[in-house]
Image (tube, rainbow, N blue to C red):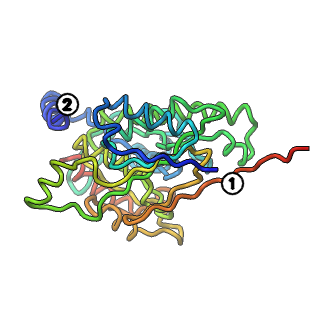
Amino acid sequence: MISVLRRMFRGFLSIFRSKKDIKLGLYGPPNGGKTTLANAICKDILGDDFEQGIVSRIAHETRSVEVRDKMELDVEGRTISFNLVDTPGIATKIDYEDFLKVGMQEKQAKKRAKEATKGVIESIKWLDDMDSVVVVLDATRDPYSQVNITILGNLAARDIPVLIAANKVDLKRANIKRIKAAFPQYPVVGISAKYGNNLDIMYKELVNLVGK
Amino acid sequence: MVTIQFMPYTEIEDLTSVGRIRKLLNIAKDNKIVLLQGRLKAEEEAELIQATMEEINKDFKGIELAVIEPKEKEGGFKGFFTNLFLGDRLGMTVIGPATVVKSIKRNPNKIELLTKEIRKRKKR
C-alpha cells in the first residue's frame, strides 16, 4: 500500500520536475568502481580536465555524496540531461582495523571508518531522491551478496529504473554471466570504467534508462 | 562458543519497523547470531544497515546479513494466496555480528556461514 502511494507521489512530482533535474545515481558496494565510472563519464562528457572524485584501491575512498550537475549525453541523436550522483559504497560492516592492514595510521584509520559509516547512511538516505540508478558491481566478485540484493530490492520497491554495470571486465576473473544469472530482471552491461571498455554500449543503455 | 538464536516471525510480526530493527540489532550486538523465520521488507533491510552504521564503535564492527528465499515464487492463484497468508514469513534471514561472523556466502539454495576464530589469551 505504502509503495503504491509512493509511486503515485513520485509520478505526481515528476510532472513538475524539469527534465534537467533528473538524478542519475551510481550505487553499489565499496570498491566496485563507482567513482572510476563517474570520472570516466565526466571525462567523456565534459573533457579530460573534469573528474568527479579520487579513486583508490582502499575501500571507502568516497565517503560523501558527490553531485555533478548539468550533464548532457548525446547518443545517436538522442540527448539526455541529468545530474550525476556518485555515492559512497554501501556496506554492513566497517572495521577500522581493516584500514590498519593496508598501512594506515590508527588515528587516520579510525577517522576513515567513522566517515565511512556516515557515508553509508548518506547513500541510503539519497535513495529516495534518485530517478534512475546504475548499480556498479565488481564482476570479479560473488554477485549474491546481501548488500547487492538489498540495494536492488530497495530500488525495485521505489520503482526506480536500474542498469547494472558489471565493472572490471578487463580482469581475467571477471564473470558477467554470473551477474546476469543472479539478476536476470535487469539489463547488465560489462564495462571497464578504468580503461573505458564498452562505455559506448553503456551510454546507449543509459539513454533508454534515463528516458524511461 | 557461538550462540545461535532462532526467532519465529511471530516475535516481530506486530512490531513497527523501528521495533523490528532494534530487536534484531540488539541480539547481534549481544554477539549472537539470529536466525529469523521469514524476512524483513527491502526498506527495513536498508534501515537495518543505517541503524548498524549509527552504532558502530570499537566493540561493534557491524553485521553480516543474508536472506534466503524460496527458490521460485509461485504464480497464479496458489501463489497469490501463499503470498497473502505467508508473505514475509517465507524464507530465512541470518544476521550475525561482524566480530563473530567472518562472512556469509550465499547462492540461491544455501547459505554458508564462516565464523571467526576466537583467540583466547593464555593465562600466565
Quarter in which the C terminus of chain B is drawn: top right
Extreme left residue here?
B77
Provide the secondary structure element on which disc 1 rests.
loop
For label 2, count other residues whose C-alpha is less than 10 Å away and answer few (under 14), some (14-19) or many (20+): few
Say which amino acid is labelled 1. Glu
For label 2, the residue is A18
Q: Is residue A116 left or right of residue A103?
A: left
**Among the 4 quarters of the image, the one containing residue A127:** top left
The residue shown at (36%, 41%) is A25
Looking at the picture, does residue B14 appear above or below residue B105? Answer: above
Q: Nearer the observer, disc 1 or disc 2?
A: 1
Q: In this view, does A75 lie to the left or right of B47?
A: left
For label 1, count other residues whose C-alpha is less than 10 Å away and answer few (under 14), some (14-19) or many (20+): few
**Among the 4 quarters of the image, the one containing residue A20:** top left
Residue B70 % position (x, y): 29, 60
Say which amino acid is labelled 2. Ser
Tell me the distance, in whole angstroms, between the alpha carbons under discs 1 and 2: 55 Å
Residue toward you, A128 or A53: A128
Residue toward you, A154 or A28: A154
The chain containing the residue under callout 2 comes to A
For label 1, the residue is B117
Looking at the picture, does residue A82 appear above or below residue A192? Answer: above
Residue toward you, A171 or A103: A103
Residue toward you, A154 or B31: B31
Looking at the picture, does residue B118 appear above or below residue A9? Answer: below
Residue B72 % position (x, y): 25, 64
The residue shown at (16%, 30%) is A9
Residue A118 % position (x, y): 51, 30
Query: Residue A16, which numbered label?
Result: none
The residue shown at (55%, 40%) is B62
The chain containing the residue under callout 1 comes to B
Residue B121 % position (x, y): 81, 46
